[in-house]
Image (cartoon, rainbow, N blue to C red):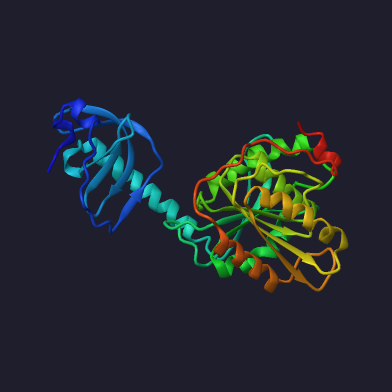
């Protein structure tokens, strides 16, 4: 067995030590740099990547990004005690998160905007295998109501659903940008999810907002669920390439349906996959069965990869509020 503390620092930093381990009770922790010591008192600064309490292995990341795996008993008693306490806290948190499965939980961002939002965790939710997440917007700003439109489908697919309050039509977009800038990181920090499976959606003006944030927010957005929505006259969309976009309109929703040819053309320029889903009705949210069909299509059409939007908005000549945004 190789003890990294006994290696010359130059040698340590130039290599990665890989050891096969059966991870029966692993603990993965967000990167956290600290000084680690061996039993002889020699130390090195590194980030904790992984602690396997069953296999008694610890994986650390060095300052150059290389990872090294070592035996737990090579570390000082203080480091071992720190790991034990850290694991206790992680397991305690994981148990609390697991208890949310099958429930809707409400949160509020902790900044000056104090944006409330509501999260549905499917009953299949597991903290150690976080699923896809869809963030929804309502034209009236009701997060719980718009979350309710996808809750049944989220349960079937095993996705997390999020409904944001406060994002209303005819609001000052500069003000809402501040709210979005605050609430999105809070959602990402609070709700354990697959960071490479992010989706946006909404109804009417909420769908417009989903399109807008798909280009103005740099994230690997994978798709959009647009109920009765449109792009507000955009001639381009600086979104993440190859998104899947499900346009879900009532067959008598004349205004929304009239926008489909133009919007489809804009999306296809970005190599997005677009599919329309129709149902009997007007400018309303689709029935649960149609929503499920659309979201299943989003899931199967998702293209892997960490593609990002440019972070720049395209002009929206048909929407007076968004025209104000630079």
Q: Nearer the viewer, residue 26 or 41?
A: 26
Looking at the image, residue 71 lies above or below residue 299 = above
x 15%, y 30%: residue: 7
Q: Using the rendered image of the protein, determine whether residue 172 is visible from the camera's viewpoint.
A: no
- Residue at horizontal 54%, vertical 51%? 191
Q: Quadrant of the N terminus?
A: top left
At x 72%, y 44%, the residue is: 212
User: Does residue 187 appear in the picture of this structure?
Assistant: yes
> With 64 as the anchor, is 280 left or right in this view?
right
The percent position of residue 167, horizontal first and vertical second, equals 75, 46
How many circles with numbers are drawn on the protein? 0
Of 246 and 170, which appears nearest the observer? 246
The quarter of the picture where the C terminus appears is top right
What residue is shown at x 75% (from left), y 52% (from top)?
Answer: 263
Name the one closer to the observer, 279 or 84: 279
The quarter of the picture where residue 282 lies is bottom right
């Amino acid at each position: 067995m190789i003890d990294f503390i006994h290696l010359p620092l130059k040698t340590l930093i130039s290599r990665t030590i890989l050891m096969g381990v059966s991870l029966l009770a692993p603990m993965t922790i967000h990167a956290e740099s600290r000084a680690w010591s061996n039993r002889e008192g020699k130390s090195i600064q590194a980030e904790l990547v992984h602690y396997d309490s069953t296999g008694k292995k610890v994986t650390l990341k060095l300052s150059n990004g290389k990872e090294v795996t070592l035996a737990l008993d090579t570390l000082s008693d203080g480091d071992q005690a720190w790991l034990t306490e850290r694991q206790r806290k992680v397991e305690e948190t994981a148990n609390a998160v697991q208890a949310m499965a099958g429930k809707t939980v409400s949160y509020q961002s902790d900044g000056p905007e104090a944006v409330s939002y509501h999260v549905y965790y499917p009953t299949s939710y597991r903290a150690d295998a976080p699923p896809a997440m869809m963030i929804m917007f309502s034209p009236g700003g009701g997060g719980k109501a718009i979350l309710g439109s996808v809750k049944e489908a989220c349960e079937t697919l095993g996705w997390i659903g999020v409904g944001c309050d406060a994002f209303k039509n005819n609001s000052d977009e500069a003000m809402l940008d501040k709210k979005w800038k605050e609430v999105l990181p809070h959602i990402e920090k609070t709700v354990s999810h697959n960071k490479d499976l992010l989706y946006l959606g909404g109804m009417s003006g909420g769908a417009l907002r989903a399109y807008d944030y798909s280009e103005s927010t740099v994230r690997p957005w994978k798709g959009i669920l647009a109920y009765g929505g449109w792009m507000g006259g955009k001639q381009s969309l600086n979104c993440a390439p190859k998104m899947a976009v499900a346009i879900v309109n009532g067959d008598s929703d004349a205004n929304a349906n009239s926008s489909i040819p133009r919007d489809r053309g804009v999306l296809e320029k970005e190599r997005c996959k677009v599919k329309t889903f129709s149902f009997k009705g007007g400018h309303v949210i689709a029935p649960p069965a149609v929503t499920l069909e659309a979201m299943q299509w989003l899931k199967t059409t998702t293209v892997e990869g960490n593609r990002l939007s440019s972070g720049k908005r395209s002009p929206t000549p048909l929407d007076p509020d968004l025209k104000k945004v630079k």
